[in-house]
Amino acid sequence: MKNTQLNAWMWRWHTIAGLITLPVFALLALTGLLILLQSDYEALKHSDIRQVSPQNEQVSLQQQLVAATKQFGKIPGSYTIKSDPNLATEFVTGHHGEKSYVLVNQYTGEVTGTYERGDALFAIVRSLHGELMLGEFGSYMIELVNSWLFVLVVTGIFVWWPKKKFKRASFFTIRFNKGKRLLYRDLHSVLGAWTSLVLIVMLASGMFLTVVFGSLYKDIQKSADSGYPPIWRSGKSLSSTQIGDPLTLDTMVQVAKQLNLPGTITISLPKKSDSVFTVKNRTNFSDQQVVHIDQYSGEILRRVTWDEVGTMAAARSLFMRLHMGSFYGLPYWYLLVVSMVIFVLISVAGLVAYLMRKPQGSWGLTQVPDSFKANKLIVTAVVIFAVLLPLFGISLAIIIGASYLQKMLARKRHYKRTLGTPSDANPAA
């Protein structure tokens, strides 16, 4: 049986956490859903320049590279090996959300079109998701909300758990015929409980993108020398021999295939006469490699395996993949898409249920008896959490301080009213 005072205390903090987080959480879930769908949106939007009609012969990759270079006005950054004969060859320049693509028909050698990864629509979506379109201040707000969402989940699971014993209906049933308030409450609690694990994963992984926690993590990673080897990111420290003619892209693709790397293979193209080709594969972390190759001889200058990546950098990469939906294929991606829809629903349902039960002129916070004291385990957990997430710790201190100040002022007003009653006057006066 649950402790009723502890349950009331959890309810109170669940409500506080919800007031801090739910409106922004709904926005984050919606924009997160759109970001997950970005690749499909772009594939559909640019299908006219991505789709080609297969023919018997293809022009050389080197000719396609020349066409792409002419379109870009400079040598593209990379080429990804593809096997689908219905898709045009893609050459890419830029990084992350600001990539530019030139597509070349591999059967004619002609450029079919170009597009930008960070178009106007998704520039707005990503800005909302990362900083609420408020710059650095918005980034701090996102981190604050992210921190309090942990509190929302933990307290929510506690108050959702049956008070006396397990009941199957309590775990799975949404009551559609018991009135709107109970319907919204069930939508919020039941769906929220069953997606809580996914939410915890998204929150934990999202912290690595934040201003305070993310920066602290990077600083510790750098101090511990637990990052990526410099040679993993770039082969700029290496030089090609400059003997003879450089390898064509066609020859380089054959060299890359002979490496027998699993997954999707991308070749970064040399920009200078002494630069190198860099071959990378995207697959399970343990199988990832970076291979730097002389652009003239095809000789391997440096091969870097995942074993050389520091533990902290490896952990951050794992969480980043979890957050971006690129963790072990489509099943996880579908799980996130469904979860984002549910997150929007439970946010709206939670707010509506709160507004329907909240008394007029009150915050609707559950009253906790003055005799209740949180046990040492809970206090320790809160302190540890406040240290790990500084913005949570600061905001918690402000809330507790404001609560104590409010109680002190209320006692002072009560004391003054008590002294001013006729019963307190001297009868002999």
Image (cartoon, rainbow, N blue to C red):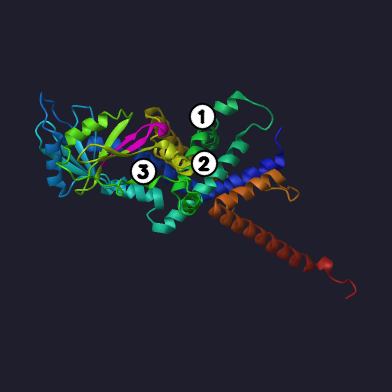
> In the displayed image of the protein, which residue is found farthest to the right?
428
Q: Is residue 17 left or right of residue 242?
A: right
Query: In which quadrant of the rendered image does the N terminus lie?
Result: top right
The residue type indicated by label 3 comes to Trp
Tell whether position 77 is magenta.
no
How many numbered circles does the render carry?
A: 3
Region in magenta:
277-290
Question: Mark 1 and 2 residues: CB-CB less than 8 Å, in contact?
Answer: no
**CA separation, marks 2 and 3?**
46 Å
Q: Name the mark nearer the viewer: 2 or 3.
A: 3
The residue type indicated by label 1 comes to Phe
- The disc label shown at residue 395, or none: none
**CA separation, marks 3 and 1?**
55 Å
Q: Residues within 10 Å of mark 3 (few under 14, many from 20)?
A: many
Tell whether position 282 is magenta.
yes
Position in image of residue 78 (x %, y %) = 24, 41
Q: Is residue 404 left or right of residue 318?
A: right
- The disc label shown at residue 232, or none: 3
* Residue bearing the label numbered 2: 350
- The disc label shown at residue 176, or none: 1
**CA separation, marks 1 and 2?**
16 Å
N-term-proximal mark, 1 vs 2: 1
Tell me the SS state at disc 2.
helix
The residue type indicated by label 2 comes to Gly
Instruction: Work out whether residue 152 can be spotted.
Output: yes
